[in-house]
């Protein structure tokens, strides 16, 4: 199949695994807030869902850097090597043992789902549509709105720090995380808020599991210039 079709199939499968992991985390969070809840099955479900999502998170990052064919081949090679390297030693922690078993099964499922995907070489001059950079929208800014110091610091961090928002499947407490290339790391809710206000924007339509860069809009630039 061609690279675009393969990317769409892989992205849909990845997003299903992310959604399932999110559902299991939310269920566990609700049970933790309720006294007397039986957490064993909920914790096991989270471990399983997180382990199944993990190779898909890595895959989307590889695809973003190296393309669909090379990214998939590299992640399948890693999954295979990790499976071959699994031992039978057990820990005294039942949670650790359950997590290792879930990781093992997650790798096997990933290899099973992606088995037999023969991806044609994409033309060198043809970028992968789902990961293509979006052009910055042109905006007319009549007047910069008033902002709080915290909001201005968030905008400055986006301008100067190379901010990326990435959906993470490695935390039970958060759905997205902020990554910066340098400088202070702003709070995720502040970054999402300035995006909602259209003071900042995503720089690509890549899946959130792979990470989306954030840049200022003309409004955000005007706020900092004011």
Image (spheres, grey):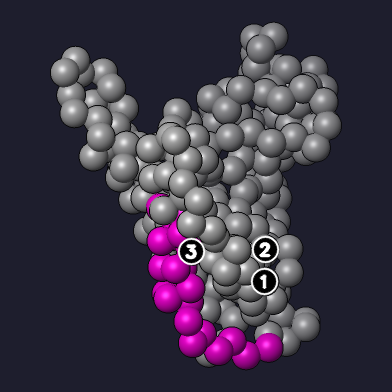
Q: Position of residue 218 (x, y in %)?
A: 72, 36
State which quadrant residue 84 falls in.
bottom right
Can residue 81 be seen from the camera position used here?
yes
Residue at x 19% of width, y 15% of height: 35
Residue 155 vs 132, above or below: the answer is above
**The residue tagged with tag 3: helix, strand or loop?**
helix
Given residues 172 and 209, the one toward you in this image is 172
Q: Work out how far the residue at label 3 is from the one at label 2, CA to CA, in angstroms.
A: 16 Å
Identify the residue position indicated by label 1 in the image.
74
Q: How many marks?
A: 3
Residue at x 45% of width, y 28% of height: 173
Q: Position of residue 48 (x, y in %)?
A: 37, 50
**The residue tagged with tag 2: helix, strand or loop?**
helix
- Badge 1: how crowded within 10 Å, few (<14), some, or many (20+)? some
Query: Residue 106 colored magenta?
Result: yes
Residue 54 is left or right of residue 179, and the answer is left
Q: Work out how far the residue at label 1 is from the one at label 2, CA to CA, in angstroms.
A: 8 Å
Q: Is the residue under label 2 in contact with that under label 1 (CB below 8 Å)?
A: yes
Identify the residue position indicated by label 3 in the image.
107
Q: Earlier in the sequence, mark 1 or mark 2?
A: 2
Query: Residue 144 colored magenta?
Result: no
Q: Earlier in the sequence, mark 1 or mark 3?
A: 1
Q: What stretch of residues is rendered in magenta?
A: 102-121
Residue at x 67% of width, y 63% of height: 62
Q: Position of residue 186 (x, y in %)?
A: 67, 23
Q: Residue furthest top?
A: 149
Label ID, residue 62: 2
Residue 185 is left or right of residue 192, and the answer is right
- Badge 3: how crowded within 10 Å, few (<14), some, or many (20+)? many
């Amino acid at each position: 199949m061609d690279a675009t079709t393969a990317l769409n199939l892989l992205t849909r499968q990845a997003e299903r695994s992310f959604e399932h992991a999110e559902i299991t985390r939310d269920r566990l969070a609700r049970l933790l807030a309720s006294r007397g809840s039986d957490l064993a099955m909920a914790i096991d479900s989270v471990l399983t869902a997180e382990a199944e999502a993990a190779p898909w998170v890595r895959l989307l990052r590889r695809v973003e850097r190296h393309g669909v064919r090379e990214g998939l081949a590299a992640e399948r090679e890693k999954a295979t090597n990790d499976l071959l390297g699994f031992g039978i030693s057990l820990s005294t922690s039942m949670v650790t043992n359950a997590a290792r078993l879930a990781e093992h099964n997650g790798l096997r499922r990933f290899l099973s789902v992606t088995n037999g995907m023969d991806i044609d070489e994409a033309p060198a001059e043809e970028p992968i549509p789902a990961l293509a950079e979006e052009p910055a929208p042109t905006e007319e800014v009549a007047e910069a709105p008033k902002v709080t110091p915290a909001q201005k610091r968030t905008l400055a961090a986006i301008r100067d720090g190379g901010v990326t928002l990435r959906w993470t499947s490695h935390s039970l407490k958060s759905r997205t995380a902020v990554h910066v290339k340098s400088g202070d790391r702003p709070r995720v809710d502040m970054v999402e808020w300035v995006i909602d206000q259209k003071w900042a924007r995503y720089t690509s339509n890549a899946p959130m599991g792979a990470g989306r860069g954030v840049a200022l809009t003309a409004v955000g630039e005007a706020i900092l210039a004011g």
